[in-house]
Image (cartoon, rainbow, N blue to C red):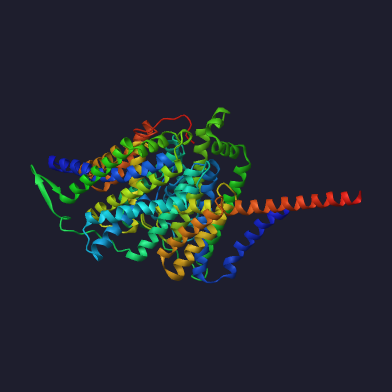
Amino acid sequence: MLQKKNLWWVVALAAFVAFPLLQKNPSYQTIGVWTLLYMACAASWNMFSGYSGYIALGSGVFFGSGAYTMALISVHAHMAPGAAMFWLVPVAGVVATAIAVPFGWISLRVRRHTFVVITIAFFFIFQNAASNLSFTGGTSGLQLPFITWGVSYFDLPFYYVALGLVIFVTILSALVRRSRFGLQLLAIRDDEDRALGLGVKVQAVKITGFAMSAFTIGMAGAVYAMFLGQVYPAGSGFAFDPLFDLSIAMMSFFGGLGTLAGPLIGALILESAQQYLTVNYSNGSLYLILLGGLFLIVFMVMPQGIVVAIRDRVSKRAQREKAAVADNELLTAGAAK
Amino acid sequence: MNFTAFVDAAKDGILTGSLYALMATGLTLIFGVMDIINVAQGILVILGAYLSYALSVHLGIDLFVGLAITIPTLFVVGIVIEKAFLGRLKGPEKTAMSILVTFAVALLIEGSLNMIFSVNPVQLHAWYVNRSFSVGGIHFAYIYVAGFVLAVVMLSALYYMLYRTRFGVSVRASLADQASAALVGIDVRRVSTICFGIGVAVTAAGGMIYGATTTFNANTSYDLISRLLTIIVLGGMGSLGGAMLGGVLLVFVGNIVGVIAGPIWSTMAYYVLLVIVLLVRPQGLFGKQSARVA
């Protein structure tokens, strides 16, 4: 089992490590940073929503909280701009997790349909708070310490930190998937009442999963704030962006909900496409049409997502080959008689 | 803070709230019959507003007369969306998938509207838009009163359809239990398609009044859809009465808080209200409490 499947992961990792070394154009390196951040967020989102079937559309709360944690601490502690600020990234993850616990406690008392909508409501509560409270700098936001390291390698530290987040969340997802806890999440997805009847502490499992998924998303938000150099509460591409929630959900569905590689592939395709279109045509509207259209086409052709569609095709072919071999054996056996 | 401000807030809450009630009724009807959460409802309201805008600016058609064109148009748009995409949804992830599919549809419409009408905010104009009359010292803007009347008329028509016609019986049967409805010979697929069309068609009226009372572009749909979703959750998803009460309550509470604590907190107020209601009654005000809701 180890060889062929794991080889793909190694090849992909090598390609990601090598990318900024081979592609020196800073605008493409920047695309790489955004894409990796979205890959980390989509994978982390999938670890809860994909496994448990509870579609959260308020994960922007964690992303924004992470971004604001980075901004507030670095500003108020008068940190020197530089690599030391990366130490705040895990702190931001912890803050996001701490917010996720009460958020989950309230919103996970209801079942799926309502959960979706409550998470959206929470998102707007946080966005409003960030726009209106004084310590967050209101609508004008906060300016982070201005990072001055060399222009020629400016993106590289962000790129590799973001890659580190992707690796971290992928390993975490794989471990969760194989653990007893992961099975409990899957049981909740398949039949929550039966899981409860069989002794799964559904509420505790759901809150734990929700909080775990917040951790990496918060860290990604912190890297985002540091990379951008500023945080604003609202608006497209800023700390609390409603498109963020829907994008990571769509990326996961696009690639394959509940699979390990699906959200990564979905985010890789969709986010890099968006950034490429923005950089080269600076046309956000065209991107919206493409994103919507692409999703609908994929939905019509492969309603389960890319990864599942490919896996099904491969396993069907394997079955056919096996059947063909068996037929041949029968024929030769018959001929020998 | 004074008494008149409260009266104004209450009056606007009822007048504007009725419009939100109308738009949310479409949304909750779709959810109740089809288990579909139509997050494109917000952008469809904006689409309705832009249609009225195009008709009035380019063809000089009055906003209310234009409804005779925009309502059927959006009905057809709804039927097309349902036939092309939503009818294909099935299985346990149906509701979750419906959010993403309708979101994709919303993005397509948003991108197209941005390209056709640009992102500069516009507002609908007519001679009655900025006029008002006063009764007993309270000012009433014509457009708000007209919107209220329109909402009441359309909601009454909807209720008549649901409770006095044969088709309405099929819809209510499908709302109550799809499998049983199919068993007694109701064509649930057809009922679903038409309900989706109706749920979308009401946005034309909502969009016209919305566009006349505030400036809009495609991006304002995010604010709209978040309000509409809040309303139907507050009222209980699938409950028509809940959507009406929720709509009025939302604007009412928002306005009252706006008067007491300042306008910036009014948006926050109804989200907080929602959270409080759900802590006490997770199924919403009029939601059905069922043992197995997947």
- Relative to the observer, which residue lies in front, A308 or B154? B154
x and y percentages locating residue B272 in the rendered image: 33, 40
Kindly identify the residue that appears in the image at 35 percent across and 40 percent down.
B232
Q: Is residue A78 visible?
A: no
Q: Residue furthest right?
A: A337
- Residue A190, image x and y in percent? 56, 37
Q: Is residue B16 above or below residue B119?
A: above
With A169 as the anchor, is A336 left or right in this view? right
Tell me if B81 is positioned left or right of B228 in this view: right
Residue B151 coordinates in the image, percent (x, y): 25, 45
**Residue B288 versus residue B284: which sits nearer the camera?**
B288
Q: Is residue B68 visible?
A: yes
The correct choice, above or below, for A25 with respect to A144 in the image is below
The image quadrant that residue A189 belongs to is top right
Q: Residue furthest left?
A: B136
Q: Residue at x 50, y 56 (%)?
A: A38
Q: Position of residue A33 (x, y in %)?
A: 51, 61
Judged left or right of residue A121, residue A270 is: right
Q: Nearer the viewer, residue B127 or B190?
A: B190
